Image: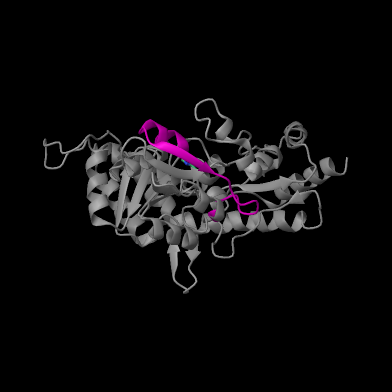
Amino acid sequence: MNIQMVDLKGQYSKIKPEIDKAIIDVIESTAFINGPEVKAFQSELQDYLKVKHVIPCANGTDALQIALMALGLKPGDEVITSNFTFAATVEVIGLLQLTPVLVDVDADTFCMDVEKLKKSITPQTKAIVPVHLFGQCANMEEIMKVAKEHHLFVVEDNAQAIGAEYTFSNGETKKAGTIGHIGTTSFFPSKNLGCYGDGGAIFTNDDNLASICHSIVNHGMGERYYYERLGVNSRLDSIQATILRIKLRELENYSAARNRAAAYYDKAFADVQQIKTPVRNPKSTHVFHQYTCVGCGVDHFALQKYLGEKGIPCMIYYPVPLHTQEAYKTPQMKDEDFEVTNELCKSVFSLPMHTELTEEQLKYITDSVKEFINK
Ligand SMILES: *Cc1c(COP(=O)(O)O)cnc(C)c1O
């Protein structure tokens, strides 16, 4: 059995004729950069997310950097984010000479702990970057409340949860990434909406922030050849955009397929005490970028090795807390403030999760995990 963490080949085979034609059409058109396919994708993504502006860019890390640049923060301003996330979130804060302040996460949802967020706010705090980790939203209603009270910007790192929907206590729903002042995403191939190379985007409902982001992605240019600010060169190319247009139409089906696989895993592990399956945030739908379990008394590296020998990939997202990383650690970050993150890094494991998993594969995976547990 050929099991992959993400089966991009299987997914491609189902849309191959359409994708191949679209790529050739772009090549024939030679409109490789900023062509009509990019504009069309931008507008279709705006409609899907129900957001006023989408600004495509080169990757998810750039999207975060550009979003933070647009806020006009000054060196030394503090930006609060989660300790349990992919490194890019913290990296861009440091690159802009802002001060990253890490907060611990909630043990059930792996997203920013709002009580600990409140305690991390100082007069220097200017922005919060919640991460919708593994495919469901952080507690955005509470985070927006805290932000409003302290006049802070909110930039949602939505690289892992595109398509997830958050429900506010008044019944209103919004798509992940469209709740804060700016949202960012990645179209890295293995993300839920992945292209066939690098890609990313920024979302906002704020006309002013949108126009600043449009200028930053294009060298800070306002009127042609007049540069109004420092910018970067960060573009989504037309071949990626044409692929994304096709895959955006499938995104709801893809999320449903991921949820079916998650439901199979949930059921298979329901009576396995050593495995804590993903806890759903009742305010958010889950798009299962990852199916991440917490092992109770399970050596996750030994499990990973055991599954590996049976041809089953298993990943540890994330094995090392960011506050202990050479690149980011500071004397202000104290180990005792990150109890949950420290524990998660020692116990989580992610099982294969993609749109093409068959029941036969899921049975083999879950049987193998149980075999290890009962060994
Ligand atoms: C993937 C990812 C990014 C970075 O996206 P790239 O397109 O690889 O630059 C940022 N944040 C999170 C949480 C991610 O998962």
Q: Which residue is rendered at x = 54% and y = 25% of the image?
A: 326
As displayed, is residue 38 above or below residue 325? below
Indicate the position of residue 325 as horizontal and vertical percent values: 55, 29
Residue 91 in the magenta stretch? The answer is yes
Residue furthest out toward the top: 326
Indicate the position of residue 33 as horizontal and vertical percent values: 26, 38
Look at the image and give the residue range highlighted in magenta: 89-114
In which quadrant of the rendered view does residue 282 lie?
A: bottom right
Residue 57 in the magenta stretch? The answer is no
Indicate the position of residue 264 as horizontal and vertical percent values: 70, 56
Residue furthest out toward the right: 375
Indicate the position of residue 152 as horizontal and vertical percent values: 37, 52
Q: Which residue is rendered at x = 55% and y = 55% of the image?
A: 115
Q: How is the image coloured?
A: one colour
Quadrant location of the C terminus? top right
Quadrant location of the N terminus? top right
Total label count? 0
Q: Which residue is rendered at x = 48% and y = 44% of the image?
A: 81
Residue furthest out toward the front: 123
Q: Which residue is rendered at x = 46% and y = 37% of the image?
A: 90
- From this viewpoint, is residue 198 visible? no
In which quadrant of the rendered view does residue 280 lie?
A: bottom right
As displayed, is residue 15 above or below residue 95? below
Q: Nearer the viewer, residue 302 or 153?
A: 153
- From this viewpoint, is residue 64 visible? yes
Q: Nearer the viewer, residue 374 or 129?
A: 129
